Amino acid sequence: MDVYQVIKEPHITEKATLEKEKANQICFKVHKRSNKIEIKHAVETLFKAKVLDVRIMNVRGKRRVMGRNAGKKPDWKKAMVKLVPGEKVEFFEGI
């Protein structure tokens, strides 16, 4: 899989921001079929930062109801990437 397809977008929440400051971890929404090795390679290639550890989790989409109509948000995969101490990702510095 291409490195540009593995990482979809950064997942920026209050918890992710705290983890970035406290534990040097960044959070991404990634492709559903990607694995830890592909995610590590993609982060090291795109952001030129050494990766120490990758944790992934599947997030189930929530049910939504609008009046009589019920639907479901899509499922997605989240990756928590821990960087080597001293490494930074310039993309997240202004956030």
Image (spheres, grey):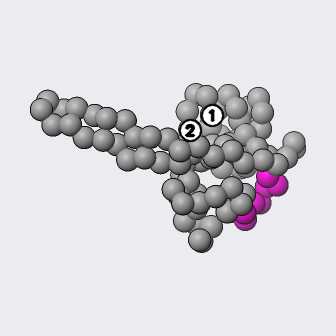
Q: Secondary structure at mark 2?
A: loop
Q: Secondary structure at mark 1?
A: helix
What residue is drawn where x is 68% and y is 55%? 36
Do residues under tags 2 and 1 come within 8 Å of each other at their CB atoms?
yes
Query: Relative to residue 9, is residue 33 depicted above or below?
Result: below
Numbered tag placed on residue 16 in the rendering: 1
- Relative placement, left or right, of 66 versus 74 is left
Circle 1 residues within 10 Å: few <14, some 14–19, many ≥20: some
Q: Quadrant of residue 18?
A: top right
Name the spot of residue 73 as percent of width and height, x first: 34, 43
Q: Quadrant of residue 45?
A: bottom right
- Relative placement, left or right, of 75 versus 47 is left
Q: Is residue 48 magenta?
A: yes
Badge 2 amino acid: Ile
What residue is drawn where x is 40% and y is 40%? 61
Marks 2/1: CA distance? 6 Å
What residue is drawn where x is 59% and y is 71%? 1
| Residue 83 visible to an observer of this rendering | yes
- Relative placement, left or right, of 64 versus 89 is left
Circle 2 residues within 10 Å: few <14, some 14–19, many ≥20: some
Of residue 48 and residue 51, the one placed in the foreground of this image is 51
Magenta segment main secondary structure = helix
Q: Quadrant of the C terminus?
A: top right
| Residue 92 visible to an observer of this rendering | no
- Segment tinted magenta in the rendering: 41-51
Of residue 88 and residue 24, the one placed in the foreground of this image is 24
Name the spot of residue 78 as percent of width and height, x first: 57, 45
Q: Residue furthest bottom?
A: 2
Query: Relative to residue 70, is residue 4 depicted above or below?
Result: below
Name the spot of residue 68 as percent of width and height, x first: 12, 32
**Can you identify the residue that label 2 sits on?**
12
Badge 1 amino acid: Ala
